[in-house]
Amino acid sequence: AEAQRQEAARTAAASAETAQAKEDREEDERREARRRAMGRILDEEVARRDAALNSDRLPASQSPLRRVRLWGRTDSNDELIKYAEAWERKIQFNTPVDAVRKVASRPHGNPMVTVAIRSDGYVESVTFVTSSGVPEVDEMIRRTVYGLMPYQAFSPLLASEYDVVEIRRTWSFDMAVRLY
């Protein structure tokens, strides 16, 4: 009788463990389904935002906006130089360190990127003149530039001359982001 009770207790314990394991698996599956659903929602939101940013835009060559291009670090317009330096500082000081370390650990080239900024401080476009050769690095740069919007609005003097400033810089990653 004692052996039968012990066997019944073992069988009951095994059944309880099996039921608990099944319940845990089902909970994990529900959690994973919720994560996937959130991921889909976030992907759709990013796609809508990207579509809104890129809709109704003329190519720069056909745009009626007054543009200036700053490819180097010198220009006769001091306001333009100050604006570009402020933009660089915002990028360099606000890029997350863990993202920089992750990028720096991967072999890649130094990408040359042109960022067009409207007078209200919002980015019109991010164009890669030279890619890093690693899509994840290029995407991190794009996310960084768009993620730090809005940038400083143009000063009244700069806004009186230009609607869009295009700043071209080469990006380098070591312990921090460096633009040169």
Image (cartoon, rainbow, N blue to C red):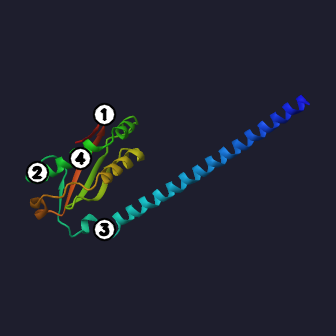
Dot 4: few (<14), some (14–19), or many (≥20) neighbours within 10 Å?
A: some
Looking at the picture, how far across and down is residue 32, in whole percent?
58, 49
Gap between marks 2 and 4 measured at Cα: 20 Å
Q: Residue at x 34, y 63 (%)?
A: 53
Instruction: Name the residue tied to disc 4.
Output: 90
- Contact between labelled residues 1 and 4, with CB atoms less than 8 Å apart: no
Q: Residue 162 — which label?
A: none
Report which quarter residue 52 is drawn in.
bottom left
Gap between marks 1 and 2 measured at Cα: 29 Å
Instruction: Name the residue tied to disc 3.
Output: 57
Looking at the picture, how far across and down is residue 157, in whole percent?
9, 60
- Secondary structure of the residue carrying tag 4 is helix
Gap between marks 3 and 1 measured at Cα: 36 Å
Specify whether 128 is left or right of 136.
Answer: left
Circle nearer the viewer, 4 or 1? 4
- Contact between labelled residues 1 and 3, with CB atoms less than 8 Å apart: no
Q: Name the residue at the right extreme.
A: 1
Sequence-first disc among 3 and 1: 3
Identify which amino acid the numbered label 3 is placed on.
Arg
- Secondary structure of the residue carrying tag 3 is loop
- Contact between labelled residues 4 and 2, with CB atoms less than 8 Å apart: no
Specify whether 49 is left or right of 23.
Answer: left
- Secondary structure of the residue carrying tag 1 is loop
